[in-house]
C-alpha cells in the first residue's frame, strides 16, 4: 500500500506513536492464513478488522487503545482494515490514517483499506439517506483519500444502494476511479442477488460486504450461491452480532445513549432473553473444545468457505487477541452438526436492524 504525503488531521493532542508502541500488545497466534476476495480481488489475511466501533455507534471508545489495537492487528498479520467515511463523520478514517502513519513500514505496506461511502448525515448525527450519483462518488472518494492520507483505496463500495440511482451508474463511477488509479477494487454492500448480477455485468466486483453469522444466515438462500456463481468474495461483518453472541453479553447490561444496540430488536426484551439462551447452548460446545464462545462463532463463519473473510469488530487488544484465537479452532463435521443443533438457521428472535433501517437493505428485498 503506497502512502502519499501525510495530511494533518484536526484531532487534538495526538498521543505520540512512541507511547502507543510502548503499550503491551498481544500476539496470540501465528500469522493468519490468506484468502482471496473473489476472482479479481486482493489477497488478505483470513480475518479482517472492522474499525467502526472505534469511532461510532457503540458509545465512547478509547483513542489510544484503538490505535494500539490497529497496530496489534497489523503486527499479527491482519491486513484488511474496514471503515466507512460516515463512521464518526470522518473520524474513523482519520484514526486509521494516523494508525497507519505511526505503524512500522512493513506493516503499513501490507495494509489494505476497505471503505464504504454514500451515507448522508446531519449535524446532529442522524442519517438522511444515500447518494450514489457519479459526481457524489468522486466527491466522497476525494475526501476519504485526504482523511486517510493515502493515494488509493483498496476496496471501495457504496454502503447502501441509492434507490434513485441505477447501480450501474454508481459502479461505473467507481470503475472510473479504478481506471484513474484512485481505487484498486470495486466492492458492494448489502445488495441482493439481482443487484449483484447487474453490478457484475458493469465491472469486475471483488466482494460483497454483508452481515453473516450464526444468527444472521439469510444470505445462504440466494445471495451466497449467486456470489459463488459469479466468483465474487464476501467480507462478513457482524460475525458476533455486535457482541450479542460473543459470550460476553448479559441481560442486565446497560447501554449508553449513543449505543445503537439500544434500538436493535435482537437486544430488546424477550428477544434478548431468547437469543442469550442460544449463546448458552453455544457455550457448552465451546467449553467442550476448550475455546471461547466468540472463537467458536468466528470459527463457524471461517468454516463456511475459503471465499469468506470475516471482519472482527475488536475495539481493544484483549478482544482482538480472543478473535485471532479463532484461527486456531478447527471444526469437524461433528462440531458443525452440534453447532447447527444448538443454533439452527432462523432461530434468532428479532430482526438484525430496526424496521426503518431494514428498509434500506437491498439484500432483504
Image (cartoon, grey):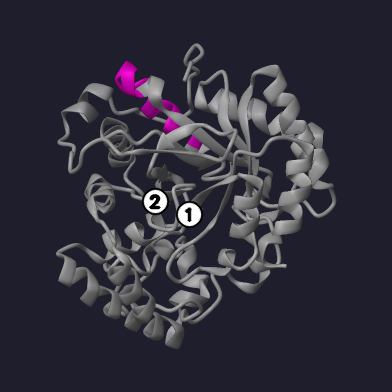
Across and down, in percent, residue 141 comes to: 66, 30
Across and down, in percent, residue 59 comes to: 41, 56
Residue at 61% from the left image edge and 36% from the top image edge: 156
Camera-nearest residue between 316 and 211: 211
Residue at 38% from the left image edge and 44% from the top image edge: 47
Q: Which residue is the site of mark 2?
A: 313
On screen, residue 132 versus residue 352, left or right, reads: right
Is residue 65 shown above or below 42? below
For residue 96: magenta? yes
On screen, residue 9 versus residue 198, left or right, reads: left
Taking the image as drawn, is residue 306 in sight?
yes
Across and down, in percent, residue 148 comes to: 51, 27
Q: Main secondary structure of the magenta part?
A: helix
* Image quadrant where residue 333 sits: bottom left
Q: Dot 2, how many residues are within 10 Å of its Cα: few (below 14), some (14-19), or many (20+)?
A: many
* Marks 2 and 1, the one that precedes in the sequence: 1
Q: Which residue is the site of mark 1?
A: 237
Q: Which residues are magenta?
A: 93-107
Camera-nearest residue between 220 and 274: 220
Residue contact between numbered discs 2 and 1, judged by CB atoms under 8 Å: yes
Secondary structure beneath label 1:
strand
Secondary structure beneath label 2:
loop
For residue 287: magenta? no
Amino acid at each position: 500500500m503506497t502512502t502519499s504525503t501525510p495530511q494533518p488531521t484536526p484531532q487534538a493532542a495526538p498521543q505520540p506513536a512512541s507511547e502507543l508502541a510502548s503499550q503491551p500488545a498481544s500476539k496470540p497466534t501465528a500469522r493468519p492464513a490468506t484468502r482471496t476476495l473473489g476472482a479479481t480481488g486482493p489477497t488478505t489475511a483470513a480475518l479482517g478488522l472492522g474499525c467502526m466501533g472505534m469511532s461510532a455507534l457503540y458509545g465512547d471508545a478509547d483513542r489510544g487503545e484503538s490505535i494500539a489495537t490497529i497496530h496489534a492487528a497489523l503486527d499479527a498479520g491482519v491486513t484488511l482494515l474496514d471503515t466507512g467515511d460516515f463512521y464518526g463523520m470522518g473520524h474513523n478514517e482519520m484514526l486509521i490514517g494516523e494508525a497507519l502513519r505511526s505503524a512500522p513500514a512493513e506493516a503499513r505496506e501490507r495494509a489494505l483499506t476497505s471503505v464504504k461511502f454514500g451515507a448522508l448525515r446531519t449535524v446532529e448525527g442522524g442519517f438522511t439517506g444515500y447518494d450514489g450519483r457519479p459526481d457524489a462518488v468522486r466527491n466522497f472518494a476525494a475526501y476519504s483519500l485526504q482523511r486517510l492520507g493515502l493515494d488509493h483505496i483498496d476496496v471501495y463500495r457504496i454502503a447502501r444502494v441509492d434507490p434513485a440511482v441505477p447501480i450501474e451508474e454508481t459502479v461505473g463511477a467507481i470503475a472510473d476511479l479504478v481506471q484513474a488509479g484512485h481505487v484498486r477494487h470495486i466492492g458492494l454492500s448489502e445488495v441482493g442477488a439481482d443487484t449483484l448480477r447487474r453490478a457484475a455485468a458493469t465491472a469486475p466486483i471483488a466482494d460483497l460486504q454483508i452481515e453473516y453469522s450464526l444468527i444472521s444466515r439469510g444470505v445462504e438462500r440466494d445471495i451466497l450461491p449467486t456470489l459463488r456463481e459469479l466468483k465474487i468474495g464476501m467480507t462478513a461483518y457482524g460475525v458476533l452480532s455486535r457482541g450479542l453472541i460473543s459470550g460476553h453479553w448479559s441481560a442486565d447490561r446497560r447501554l449508553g445513549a449513543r449505543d445503537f444496540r439500544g434500538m436493535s430488536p435482537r437486544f430488546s426484551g424477550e428477544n434478548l432473553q431468547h437469543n442469550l439462551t442460544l449463546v448458552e447452548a453455544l457455550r457448552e460446545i465451546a467449553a467442550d473444545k476448550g475455546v471461547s464462545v466468540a472463537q467458536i462463532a468466528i470459527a463457524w463463519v471461517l468454516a463456511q468457505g475459503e471465499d469468506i473473510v470475516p471482519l472482527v469488530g475488536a475495539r481493544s487488544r484483549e478482544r482482538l487477541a480472543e478473535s485471532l484465537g479463532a484461527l486456531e479452532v478447527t471444526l469437524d463435521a461433528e462440531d458443525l452438526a452440534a453447532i447447527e443443533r444448538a443454533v439452527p438457521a432462523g432461530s434468532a428472535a428479532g430482526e438484525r436492524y430496526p424496521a426503518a433501517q431494514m428498509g434500506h437493505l437491498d439484500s432483504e428485498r
